[in-house]
Amino acid sequence: MVPIPRNAALLVPLVAMLLSAPAAAQRGGTLELVPLARYSFFPDSLSLTNGLGVGAEVGLFVTRHLSLELEGNYVVSNLPDSASVTASGMDARLLVHLPLQGKATALFGVGYASRQYGRSLDQKQEGPGGLIGLRFGLGPRLGLRFEAAADYMSTPGSGAGSQWDIGAQMGISIYAGRMGPGDGDRDGVPDQDDRCADTPPGLPVDPTGCPLPQDSDGDGVLDSVDRCPGTVPGQRVDQTGCNADLDGDGVPNALDRCPATPAGTAVDQFGCPPPAPPADSDGDGVPDDGDRCPGTPSGVRVDALGCPVPATAPTPPAPRMILTDVTFKTGSATLTPAAESSLRSTASSLLLEPGVRLEVAGYTDDTGSRANNERLSYERARAVRAYLVSAGVPADRLTARGYGPADPVATNTTAAGRALNRRVELRRAD
C-alpha cells in the first residue's frame, strides 16, 4: 500500500468539512459579496503577459436559485517592451445556482463584459461572456467560489475580429441580508412547510400554517363546512350551518312561506307549490279563457286568439316570354334576318303596353367555360335590347342581363336540349 503524505492526509478532513458544511439558506433579497483573486489570460492580439489581479462580485438573489451579479476586476500587465498596462473589467451577468449532492452548488452565468486598458495601451473591448463555477459552503453565510470566466471580446471601431478573454477566479463568498426560509404570510410557519401560504394576518394557525378550526357565527358548525357563515345568533341551523328546512323542500325556514309543503311537491323560490297552468282544451297553446276558437283541430296553426291562421297563396313567378324565333349567328351576338323580323313584331306588341318595364335575359347551354357563356349571353341580350330600342321601344323600359348556362329549360345532354337552352327571354321587371 502506498503511504499517503502527511500534508495530503490533512486535506481529507478539510474536504470533508467543506462538503458537510451547512448550506446557505439564501432566498429572494439575499446579497452575496465575493472578494476574489483573478488570473487573466489576455487575447494574443494585445501581446500582454498573463497576470494575477483582484476583483469583487456583488449579487442580488431574485429567487433562491437565481441572482443578478455585477463583477469588477483589476490586473496590472506588461507589454513585450516591459511597458506597464492596467486592465480593468466590468461584467454584468445573470447567475443560476444549482444545488449539487452534499453542500456544493454549481454556478452558470451569462452576461456582458467590458475591458478598459490604460497606461501604455489605450484600448477598450466589450462583448458577451459566460461563467461556470462551484461554490462550497463553509457555513450559513460563508463559502468558497471557484470560477472560470470566458468573454468573447471585440474592439469597437477597430475592424478586428473578436477574441476570447479568459480568467480563472477564486473568492470568499459572503451572504448578507435576509436569510433562511421565507414566511410570506407572517404566521410563524416557514413557506417551505406552510400548506396555507396566504393565511390572513392575526389568525391562529396549526403547525402546517393553516388556520385553526373556527366557528365565526357561533352556530355550532365550523367555518370550514359552514355554507352560511353569517347566521343570526340563536337561529336553528342544519349540519351545513344554514337555516333548518323542516319540510325538506330545499327552501330554508327563514324564506319558506309554505313551511308544511308535502314531501315531493315541486315548489317555487318561496317554498310554495307553483300555481297550476291554465287549461288549454284544444292544445293549441292559447289558454281556454282567451281562446276564441276553443275547438281548433290538433296541428292547425293559430293566431294569438286561438283561431286558425288563413293560408297564404304562394307568390306566382314573374311572367316571362321566350323569344323562340330570335336566333344568332353561331358563337356570336349577331341577329339573323329571321330574328330581326320576329323582333319587329315583338316591338309592335310592346308599344301597345307603354307602362310595362322589361328585362331582356340571355341564356346559353353549358358547352364551354362559364365565363365565356355569361359574356356571350349578355352580349346577345344587349343586341336584342338595342334592336327593340331602334324599333321604337323607349330605352328606359328595357334592361339587359346575361345568365349564361343558369336556369336551363331542357337537358344539356342532347343537341335538341342544348338548342332550347340557347334562348332570349322577356321578363316583367316591375
Image (spheres, helix red, strand yellow):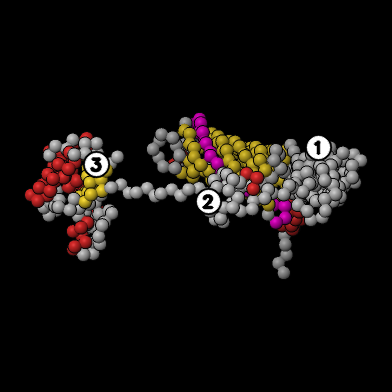
Question: What is the spatial separation of the Cα atoms under label 2 and label 3, in whole angstroms?
Answer: 39 Å
105 within the magenta span: yes
Question: What is the spatial separation of the Cα atoms under label 1 and label 2, in whole angstroms?
Answer: 68 Å
Chief secondary structure of the magenta span? strand
Tell me if mark 3 has few (under 14), some (14-19) or many (20+) residues whose alpha carbon lies within 10 angstroms of its own: many
Q: Is residue 410 left or right of residue 204?
A: left
**Residue plotted at (82% across, 50% down):** 261
* Residue 300 appears in the rendering: yes
Instruction: Label 2: state its secondary structure.
Output: loop
Circle 1 or circle 2, nearest the eye: 2
Seen as rendered, the residue at the extreme right is 234
51 within the magenta span: no
| Residue 179 pos. (x, y %) | 75, 41
Magenta region: 101-121
Q: Which residue is mark 2?
A: 301
The tag earlier along the polypeptide, 1 or 2, is 1
Instruction: Label 1: state its secondary structure.
Output: loop
Q: Mark 2 is on which residue type?
A: Arg
Q: Which residue is mark 1?
A: 201
Instruction: Label 3: state its secondary structure.
Output: strand
**As displayed, is residue 366 above or below residue 39?**
below
Q: Which residue is mark 3?
A: 358
